[in-house]
Amino acid sequence: MYRVSDWSLKSFLGLVALDLTQTVTQICQIGVDLKEFFSKDRQDPYYDVDHTVRQSVKSIERERDGLCANLANVANSLPLPSPPARTRLQLCPSAKRLVDGQDDGYINYIDKNYLTNVERELLLQSGGAFQYWKCPNCKLEIKFYVRQSQYSTLLTTREIRKCGKLTIREALLAKSHLDQRHRPASHLKYACLICMANGESLQRDRTAFECSRDLTRHLHEKHSERSLPDLIMRELRFVGRTTREENIPYDLKFA
Ligand SMILES: [Zn+2]
Ligand SMILES: [Zn+2]
């Protein structure tokens, strides 16, 4: 939500005061210039705005000075300009490195108590292992599944999951994660890389989300394989329905 800062308010009031001064000065000038037309005795110039209230130029000037002084008092009593709010929502440095293909995360063991029933069933049926990828910068952990030795890292695992019409590899979450060192009260964890590539700012529930479900729902509803130029989509490992895994490993596939 856009908020007018104290600084903006103060500047705005200053402009209003300046404007009023100029306007009233002009009115006074008109009053002086036209005093011959409006003054009965031509000794006491006044300006009659609507021909019902007659006011002397001196009194208009007094009101102007009083008004400007009041505005100046209001402006001066406002708190001093403060620096922009330090929400500092930003993509984690390691997320950016992942997008460039560099994975310097750590692998952590997951206690089975932290697995869902579906995940335990998968282990029973297919073997493999669930593990955490841990961010080297902000310590965020992403759970992912590996089965084949040669594809056992976050960026290479062939394991995917379906989210509605989307197919997702968990690397997407790691690549989209916000720096958790700078998210004090926001609890926002993931950003939409497509929106960011389009130059949009990070805003709760519009481009930044608390959980992976909200991020994938956003991707599902707001974007398609044509959201960005092909080159950038390929760089992000986002592909369309016709792409085959053998041709290009992807992190997000639009159906
Ligand atoms: Zn991180
Ligand atoms: Zn988006």
Image: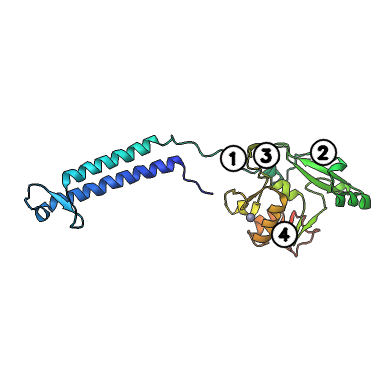
Specify the quarter for ligand 1: top right
Helix, strand or loop under label 1: loop
Helix, strand or loop under label 2: strand
**Do tag 4 and tag 3 residues touch (Cβ < 8 Å)?**
no
Checking the image for residue 239, the label placed there is: 4
Task: Determine which quarter of the picture holds residue 112.
Answer: top right
Helix, strand or loop under label 3: helix
Checking the image for residue 182, the label placed there is: none
Q: Distance between the residues labelled 1 and 3?
A: 10 Å
Dot 4 crowding, Cα within 10 Å, few <14, some 14–19, many 20+: many
Residue 53 horizontal/vertical position (percent): 19, 53
Checking the image for residue 108, the label placed there is: 2
Dot 1 crowding, Cα within 10 Å, few <14, some 14–19, many 20+: some
- Sequence order check: which comes first, mark 2 or mark 1? 1
Quarter of the rendering occupied by the C terminus: bottom right
Identify which amino acid the numbered label 2 is placed on: Asn
Identify which amino acid the numbered label 4 is placed on: Val
Q: How far apart are marks 2 and 3 (CA)?
A: 18 Å
Left or right, 172 with reference to 202: right
Residue lying at 20% horizontally and 57% vertically, measured from the top left: 50
Near-viewer residue (250 or 207):
207
- Which residue has dot 1 on it? 88
For the view shown, which residue lies furthest in the front direction? 52
- Which residue has dot 3 on it? 180
Near-viewer residue (63 or 115):
63
- Sequence order check: which comes first, mark 1 or mark 3? 1
